[in-house]
Image (spheres, grey):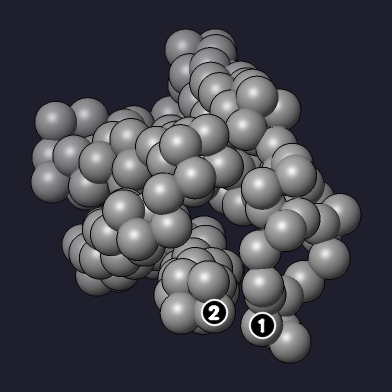
Amino acid sequence: MSTLTQSSLRNPRAIGLLALFVVVVVGVGSTIGIFTSPGQWYDGLNKPFFNPPNWIFGPVWSTLYVLIAVAGWRTFMREPNGLGMKLWYGQMVFNWMWSPVWFGLQLIWPALFVILVIDALVLAFIVNRWSRDRASALMFVPYLAWVLFASLLNLSIGILN
């Protein structure tokens, strides 16, 4: 395990990798969001009283994607082939899979399975990084809170429909 220092995080390669992480995570997430935006199907679903307004999802996910990218970058800089990076890649795959399953294919129960996998991978990432890179672990805490809330929302919509 290499040690992250202020100078190692500020060298040109590190800054370029940070930019790459942010561009890929935010870019892919935003593109998926644009192509799988809520439509008639979603509007017609029965939703629980705690369902947030649609406009909240864009700002929340934009913020979370930046935090996810920075945590991934920090993990990559420290242990590019370690378990933390494998967990990070895994949660990204399932994160990017959820909207196409939910909005694109309109599969409520399979989407619940996908988001429960995200919950587990995000929690595992936090546990893995906690003693190695507390900042990266803490960046995933709001993400975990949001996907747990989204899991409850997914489950509730499934029950109501």
Q: In percent of the image, x 53 and y 34: which residue is there?
A: 104
**Residue 111 at least partly seen:** yes
Q: Which residue is mark 1?
A: 48
* Residue 137 percent location from the top left of the image: 39, 63
- Measure the C-alpha gap from mark 1 to mark 2: 8 Å
* Residue 128 percent location from the top left of the image: 21, 62
Local packing at callout 1 (Cα closer than 10 Å; few below 14, some 14-19, many 20+) is some
**Residue 74 at least partly seen:** no
Which of these two is toward me, 78 or 59?
A: 59
* Residue 39 percent location from the top left of the image: 74, 41
Q: Which residue is mark 2?
A: 160
Q: In percent of the image, x 83 and y 65: which residue is there?
A: 53
Q: Quadrant of residue 8?
A: top left
Query: Which dot marks residue 66?
Result: none
Does 77 sit above or below residue 120? above
Please identify the quadrant where the N terminus is shown: top left
Q: Is residue 121 left or right of residue 21?
A: left
| Marked residue nearer the N-terminal end (1 or 2) | 1
